Amino acid sequence: MPIIKSLLDSDLYKITMLQSVLHKFPNIWVKYRFKCRNSGILWTDNIVNYITDEIDKYCTLTFTKEELDWLGSLRYIKKDLIEFLRIYRPQREHVHITHTPGGTDLDITVEGPWFLTTLFEVPILAIVNEVYFAETVMNEVAIRDMSTFFGTAETRLSQKIEIAKKEKFLFSDFGTRRRFSGYWQNQVIHKLAKELPRDIFGGTSNMYLAMHENLTPIGTMAHEYICVGQSLDSVTLASSQTYMLQAWVD
């Protein structure tokens, strides 16, 4: 099974930003670059080939009618966005991957029109994370005991749920881009939704999980939106935040 099985397996704020980009900035060209913040990571040929294959699979996905109906039910999503998403498909030629064989450098860039490239960010980060853990941690675990590995994780999750019940603080999940795996995020969200009231577990940024667990999708915009405004030729740096926030309100 592919790591990313649905275009909804991403954060809500990518869709809300996309709506603003379509309406206000359809001619803006952008470039994203992956940056690994951990030093000394060895990006083996197997890992890079695995990542490349998963991105290839991701670029075959389209939104289903059920997914578009769910998105369209959100009060702030406009009909023209749904019609755009009906024909949208990630374009593989917008993604470029290079690496030195057996080296420590992995270069992933996404470049193209903003409205056609913004949705790549979260899935690619989720793919990189899951592939890395599958090729390192999970290979080690498979030699030992998988049930013990996830059993320990279940125990820790249960302990955190009890703390949340006791302290009664409100939190939401924003873990998609940093998750160990799609399977484990699914398990975590299902357990949180089942065992915690909504005044403690408020929801998740992951649209796919929000839809299937009947949770509130959480998110507004990312700093990406403001960053693009800082680089617009027609706007001064000093006024760029005001400009972008007014465009958001509009």
Image (tube, grey):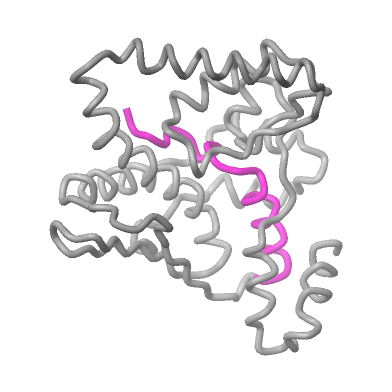
Quadrant position of residue 103: bottom left
Direction from residue 104 to residue 177 in the image, left or right: right
Quadrant position of residue 28: bottom right
The residue located at (70%, 69%) in the rendering is: 226
Could you tell me residue 42's position as x and y percent? 23, 52
Direction from residue 170 to residue 102 in the image, left or right: left
The residue located at (32%, 42%) in the rendering is: 57
* Quadrant where the C terminus is found in the figure: bottom right
Could you tell me residue 26's position as x and y percent? 63, 70
The residue located at (81%, 76%) in the rendering is: 243
Q: Tag count in the figure?
A: 0
> In front: 37, or 9?
37
Considering only vertical position in the picture, is 109 above or below 166? Answer: below
Residue 65, magenta (yes or no): no
Could you tell me residue 239's position as x and y percent? 81, 83
Considering only vertical position in the picture, is 5 above or below 167? Answer: below
* Quadrant where the N terminus is found in the figure: top left
> In front: 26, or 231?
231
Direction from residue 88 to residue 211 in the image, left or right: right
Could you tell me residue 212's position as x and y percent? 61, 21
Residue 5, magenta (yes or no): yes
- Find the magenta span and give its range: 1-25
